[in-house]
Amino acid sequence: MINQLIYEKLPQDISERNVLLLDPILGTGFYTGNSAVQAINLLISKGVPESNIIFLNLISAPQGAHVVCKSFPRIKIVTSEIDIGLN
């Protein structure tokens, strides 16, 4: 199953801002599609440089963090916990 964008409302000058992207859980992405990657792709398509995006979450699966880091090497990820059992 792939996540589908339902609603988007961003400031017109989003490309000139630093962006905090908040998602409580960065899972593996194997079962639900990787919503973090989709959200980051949306921001980049609106002109936000990767280096201006900080991705914040409470819990991360190592696999999900690797996917985000590999896809977007200039993004900063801040998490409170890496849980190897997170699915």
Image: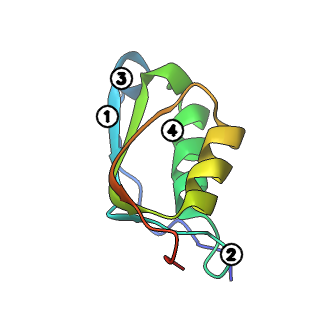
- Find the distance from the CA under tag 2 to the CA under tag 1: 31 Å
Q: Which percent across, then down, holds residue 7?
A: 41, 63
Q: Which comes before the other along the chain, label 2 or label 4? A: 2
Q: Is 13 rendered above or below residue 25?
A: above
Q: Which percent across, then down, holds residue 28?
A: 60, 69
- Amino acid carrying label 2: it is Phe
Verify CB contact (< 8 Å) between mark 3 and mark 1: yes
Verify CB contact (< 8 Å) between mark 2 and mark 1: no
- Amino acid carrying label 1: it is Pro
Which mark, residue 43?
4
**Residue 11, picture quadrant:** top left
- Residue named by callout 3: 13
Which mark, residue 73?
none
- Find the distance from the CA under tag 3 to the CA under tag 1: 5 Å
Q: Residue furthest top?
A: 16
- Residue named by callout 1: 11
* Residue at the spot 68% in from the left edge and 83% down from the top edge: 1
Q: Which percent across, then down, holds residue 17?
A: 34, 21
Q: Secondary structure at mark 3?
A: loop
